[in-house]
């Protein structure tokens, strides 16, 4: 096996585990994926190790290993917390993988990995401070400064989804109960299910985001109204990020970010809420799509070679 190193990234998802091998230039050398054995932690560890070995055999090169996972490593226990793949919670994921693979393994929140991917060689590669947004089944975020993911003192950097929706209207207050135990979290409004619930409240019909978009394109008033309110809520939530972090670029990812209509007038709406006379922050759609998380996991070791 060649001594020339590659960067291997692993994305631990609820339904699949994906591994990718990147050249230093960012070129993809190998890609593999398997179904996640979501009920068995030991099988998850073995599956990740097997994927790493497979891409190394395919490339005939040994690599550094980074893993993107929902949740984060507790600063107090070193164990995973807050993962929706629940068998991983309370486990030393990085230590167990390091032992099995015989090398250090870096584990980072999957939203931080997405942000890192877009900051290194994606939609935010020309920026110093990037805020990466995931709006899909849930809502997550990650911060990258000077090409490095900012985990934060408590390893919750960028977790804007579990802060309250800013400037709630009387109709919105106090908001829906979130799984985290609080009411009115941004995630309950801006997730894909949140969009569907809002549309259902207007029509009595439960529809997916794609169906809502299709109905809006056909001119349906309820669908147009649901997307307009969604964009306004997104603008409020992003304005709060601008006020606190003031990033150069905000990159949107996740399934809901594929709704092209959301971008029309979004910057102007954010500017109307942000505490500034003019908004210079650029809001962009992601460049790497669903590969953002796994690429970012690979880039966790970018500075090491």
Image (cartoon, rainbow, N blue to C red):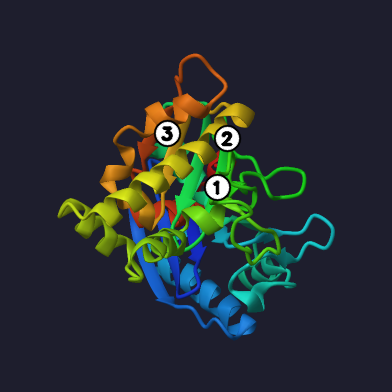
Does residue 92 lie above or below 112 as drawn?
A: below
The residue under label 1 is 141
The percent coordinates of residue 156 (x first, y second) are 68, 49
At mark 2, the secondary structure is helix
Residue at which label 3 appears: 124
Residue wearing tag 2 = 241
One can see residue 3 in this view: no
Counting from the top left corner in percent of width and height, residue 3 is at 49, 54
CB of mark 1 within 8 Å of CB of mark 2? yes
Question: Can you give x and y, in whole percent of width and height, for residue 164 in the image?
Answer: 63, 48
**Could you say which is closer to the camera, residue 281 or residue 118?**
281
Q: Is residue 244 above or below residue 42?
A: above
The relative height of residue 161 versus residue 121 in the rendered view (above or below) is below
Label 1 – label 2 distance at C-alpha: 10 Å
N-term-proximal mark, 3 vs 1: 3
Viewer-nearest of discs 1 and 2: 2
Tell me the quadrant of the picture where the C terminus can be found: top right
The spot of residue 281 in percent (x, y) is 46, 25
Mark nearest the camera among 2 and 3 is 2
Q: Nearer the viewer, mark 3 or mark 1?
A: 1
Give the Cα separation between the discs numbered 3 and 1.
14 Å
- Badge 2 local density, few (<14 within 10 Å), some, or many (20+)? some
- Identify the residue at horizontal 51%, vertical 37% (top origin): 236
């Amino acid at each position: 096996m060649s001594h020339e190193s590659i960067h291997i990234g692993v994305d631990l998802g609820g339904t699949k585990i994906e591994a990718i091998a990147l050249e230093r230039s960012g070129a993809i050398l190998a890609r593999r994926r398997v179904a996640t054995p979501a009920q068995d932690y030991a099988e998850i560890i073995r599956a990740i190790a097997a994927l790493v070995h497979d891409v190394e055999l395919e490339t005939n090169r040994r690599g550094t290993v980074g893993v993107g996972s929902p949740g984060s490593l507790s600063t107090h226990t070193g164990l995973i917390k807050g993962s929706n793949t629940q068998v991983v919670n309370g486990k030393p994921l990085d230590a167990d993988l390091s032992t099995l693979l015989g090398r250090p393994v870096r584990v980072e929140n999957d939203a931080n990995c997405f942000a890192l991917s877009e900051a290194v060689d994606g939609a935010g590669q020309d920026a110093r401070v990037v805020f990466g947004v995931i709006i899909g089944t849930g809502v997550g975020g990650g911060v990258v400064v000077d090409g490095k993911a900012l985990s934060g003192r408590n390893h919750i950097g960028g977790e804007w989804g579990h802060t309250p929706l800013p400037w709630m209207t009387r109709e919105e207050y106090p908001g829906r109960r979130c799984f985290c135990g609080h009411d009115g979290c941004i995630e309950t409004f801006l997730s894909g299910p949140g969009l569907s619930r809002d549309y259902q409240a207007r029509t009595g019909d439960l529809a997916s985001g794609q169906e809502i978009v299709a109905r809006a394109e056909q001119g349906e008033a309820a669908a147009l109204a649901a997307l307009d309110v969604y964009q306004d809520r997104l603008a409020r939530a992003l304005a709060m990020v601008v006020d606190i972090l003031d990033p150069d670029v905000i990159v949107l990812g996740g399934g809901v970010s594929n709704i092209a209509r959301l971008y029309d007038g979004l910057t102007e709406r954010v500017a109307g809420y942000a505490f500034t006379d003019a908004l210079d922050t650029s809001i962009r759609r992601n460049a790497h799509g669903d590969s953002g998380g796994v690429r970012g996991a690979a880039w966790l070791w970018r500075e090491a070679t």
